[in-house]
Image (cartoon, coloured by chain):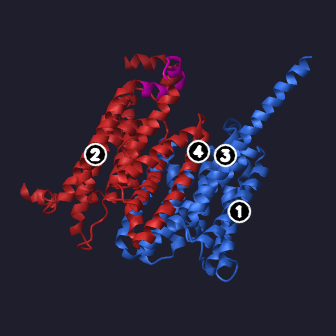
């Protein structure tokens, strides 16, 4: 499990989990799950186009991801945000369907682009992944304070001179960068699940941003490693394990916090008569 | 005249069975998604609408695996997913967003598993493409009656709870005061949307389901503010987009490279997008005309400190 080609898999999956954990925290905080789904999913059309003209897949993914991020930003200035996201997504997927129809032997690659082909990462993809991943983390670190401000108290952010529109576009570009790096390796589905599940779980345990980011990365790592190990042993698609584990971890977190709340309520109700006495 | 017709409609267009089915089903689905989608846009539930279509594809691939009718697979999973979203999402908008994302992630996970099993059991990789992208030209004819019947049911339900739905979409607080069961209406609407979207996703593919659910209603709401009128306009825009898309896709067999049809999904999505942008232009022109007739800039009229402007307009 840890020999030969699997070494690359473990390295790539670890990088993906770290990026997804960090970026995902802000996705959940800002309530931009739809954009986080639409950008990687739509960039798939770019990969289809790149295959058609014989260009580099990562280049095609990157162009579509960045174009999608800018398109969502541009369209939502003139209309509703979720409508803009949906229209940008279907437009990119429509182009993808067009490109796909011209390249016949692509059908198998569609499955791996959508659901990931984590067991078999070529070694020469690791370095560009690391570079793009580093760029993502640096961008999030630079935008950390305005991102938090515009997410939690938009009024205060505006009073301080932060432009919410620019921060939103910048954040969408970070999501685009993260998708470009991860989609060829883990696929659209895995990337999305890893951004939502761990971050939502972490947020229900702690309200401190830095601690939540750390926890979200840790949970993402656990889910990915666990998912790859089971997928390797059972031969079932890794996307299934990662997708369902994210939801399961969030469900456990919700049950845990609900039980803690009832316990707190019980303690309080016991304490009140004591205080009254 | 006939020459114009043959350049518009390539030979054999009207005699072709799959094309006729596509024209009928496409129009029915566009009318239903147009009516349902107006509330999707007003309630800002485009993400939920898209997610239900994608999650439904898990049901589609499960049905393919077990040999049952894919339409019931789509619909069953989509309705279950809608219930889960509502239970997890509670009332806060951001929690709703995350809940939708979690259900979508899990649903896509199951889709990955079922599609993998489909591929293993039938040793064809084409299933993935068929289920995810769909095609108007591969509608099975025996399904036509159930598609039409389901569409009619959705339209009747929407029409009968129109007022409750509208009130609780525009102002939940006011609706609650008036005694409308807002939570029940929300669940019922999500279920209706699940039925409409899975109907569309099964017949015309997930991409087009989202495009028709969101695009024409958003365009219609730019043209008219009355929801009832917007439903009609959205239906008309949807039907126009689908029919133009079908004609272009059929004609594209004769475009270079010859004998290779372009996908109908691409044309319909492009038409929806064109209608959406066009509606924005028309709405902006209308606003500008109204402002000119009032003889004022909107900012000055609203400030109320320029009395002579009002006199001018009168």
Query: Of the numbered discs in the image, which one, if any, rests on residue B99?
Result: 4
Query: Of the numbered discs in the image, which one, if any, rests on residue B304?
Result: none
If you read the primary sequence from the N terminus, does the residue marked by circle 4 or circle 2 appear first? Answer: 4
Q: Do tag 1 and tag 3 residues touch (Cβ < 8 Å)? A: no
Residue identifier under label 2: B146
Q: Do tag 4 and tag 2 residues touch (Cβ < 8 Å)? A: no
Tell me which chain the residue with mark 4 is part of: B
Q: Nearer the viewer, residue A133 or B164?
A: B164
Query: Of the numbered discs in the image, which one, if any, rests on residue A29?
Result: 3
Chain B, chosen colour in render: red
Write the residue at 59% across / 54% down. Answer: A172
- Residue B273 in view: no
Q: Do tag 4 and tag 1 residues touch (Cβ < 8 Å)? A: no
* Furthest residue toward right: A277
Tell me which chain the residue with mark 2 is part of: B
* Label 3 secondary element: helix
Residue B35, relative to residue A276: is it above or below? Answer: below
Looking at the rendered image, the disc whose residue lies closer to the viewer, 1 or 3, is 1
Q: Do discs 1 and 3 share a chain?
A: yes
Q: Do discs 4 and 3 share a chain?
A: no
Residue B42, relative to residue A236: is it above or below? Answer: above
| Region in magenta | B164-180
Residue A80, relative to residue A41: is it above or below? Answer: above
How packed is label 3: few (under 14 Cα within 10 Å), some, or many (20 or more)?
many
> Residue B305 placed where, x, y %?
53, 19
Which quadrant is the N terminus of chain B positioned in?
Answer: bottom left
Looking at the rendered image, the disc whose residue lies closer to the viewer, 4 or 3, is 4
Tell me the distance, in whole angstroms, between the alpha carbons under discs 3 and 2.
42 Å
Looking at the rendered image, the disc whose residue lies closer to the viewer, 3 or 2, is 2
The blue-coloured chain is labelled A
Write the residue at 56% across / 54% down. Answer: B106
């Amino acid at each position: 499990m840890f020999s030969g080609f699997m070494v690359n898999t473990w390295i790539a999956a670890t990088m993906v989990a770290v990026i997804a954990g960090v970026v995902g925290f802000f996705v959940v905080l800002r309530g931009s799950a739809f954009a986080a789904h639409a950008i990687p999913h739509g960039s798939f059309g770019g990969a289809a186009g790149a295959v058609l003209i014989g260009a580099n897949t990562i280049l095609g993914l990157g162009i579509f991801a960045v174009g999608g991020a800018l398109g969502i930003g541009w369209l939502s200035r003139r209309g509703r945000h979720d409508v803009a996201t949906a229209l940008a997504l279907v437009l990119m997927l429509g182009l993808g369907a067009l490109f796909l129809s011209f390249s016949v032997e692509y059908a198998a690659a569609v499955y791996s682009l959508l659901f990931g082909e984590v067991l078999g990462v070529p070694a020469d993809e690791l370095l560009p992944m690391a570079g793009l991943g580093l760029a993502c983390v640096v961008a999030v670190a630079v935008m950390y304070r305005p991102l938090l401000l515009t997410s939690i108290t938009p009024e205060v952010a505006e009073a301080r001179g932060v432009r919410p529109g620019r921060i939103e576009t910048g954040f969408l570009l970070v999501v685009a960068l993260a998708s470009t790096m991860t989609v060829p390796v883990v696929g659209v589905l895995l990337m999305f699940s890893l951004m939502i599940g761990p971050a939502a779980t972490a947020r229900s345990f702690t309200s401190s941003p830095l601690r939540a980011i750390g926890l979200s990365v840790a949970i993402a790592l656990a889910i990915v490693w666990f998912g790859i190990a089971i997928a390797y042993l059972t031969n079932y698609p890794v996307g299934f394990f990662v997708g369902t584990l994210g939801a399961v971890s969030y469900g456990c977190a919700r049950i845990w916090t609900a039980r803690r709340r009832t316990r707190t309520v019980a303690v309080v109700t016991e304490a009140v008569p004591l205080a009254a006495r | 005249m006939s020459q114009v017709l043959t350049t518009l409609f390539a030979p054999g267009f009207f005699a072709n069975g799959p094309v006729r089915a596509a024209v009928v089903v496409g129009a029915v689905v566009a009318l239903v998604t147009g009516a349902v989608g107006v509330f999707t846009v007003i309630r800002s539930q485009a993400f939920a609408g898209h997610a239900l279509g994608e999650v439904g594809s898990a049901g589609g691939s499960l049905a393919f695996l077990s040999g049952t009718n894919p339409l019931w697979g789509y619909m069953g999973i989509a309705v279950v997913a809608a219930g889960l979203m509502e239970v997890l999402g509670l009332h806060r908008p951001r929690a709703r967003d995350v809940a939708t994302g979690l259900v979508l992630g899990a649903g896509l996970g199951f889709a990955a598993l079922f599609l993998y099993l489909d591929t293993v059991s039938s040793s064809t990789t084409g299933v993935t493409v068929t289920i995810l992208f769909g095609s108007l030209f591969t509608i099975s004819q025996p399904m036509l009656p159930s598609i039409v019947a389901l569409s009619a049911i959705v339209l009747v339900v929407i029409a009968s709870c129109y007022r409750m739905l509208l009130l609780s979409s525009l102002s939940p607080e006011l609706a609650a005061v008036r005694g409308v069961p807002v939570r029940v209406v929300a669940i019922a609407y999500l279920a209706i949307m699940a039925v409409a979207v899975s109907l569309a996703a099964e017949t015309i593919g997930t991409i087009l389901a989202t495009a028709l659910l969101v695009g024409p209603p958003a365009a219609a709401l730019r043209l008219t503010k009355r929801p009832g009128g917007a439903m009609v306009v959205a239906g008309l825009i949807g039907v126009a987009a689908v029919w133009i898309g079908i004609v272009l896709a059929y004609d594209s067999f004769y475009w270079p490279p010859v004998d290779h049809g372009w996908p109908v999904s691409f044309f319909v999505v492009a038409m929806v997008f064109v209608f959406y942008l066009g509606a924005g232009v028309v709405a902006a022109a209308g606003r500008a005309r109204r402002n000119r007739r009032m003889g004022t800039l909107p900012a000055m009229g609203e400030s109320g400190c320029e009395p002579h402007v009002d006199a001018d307009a009168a």
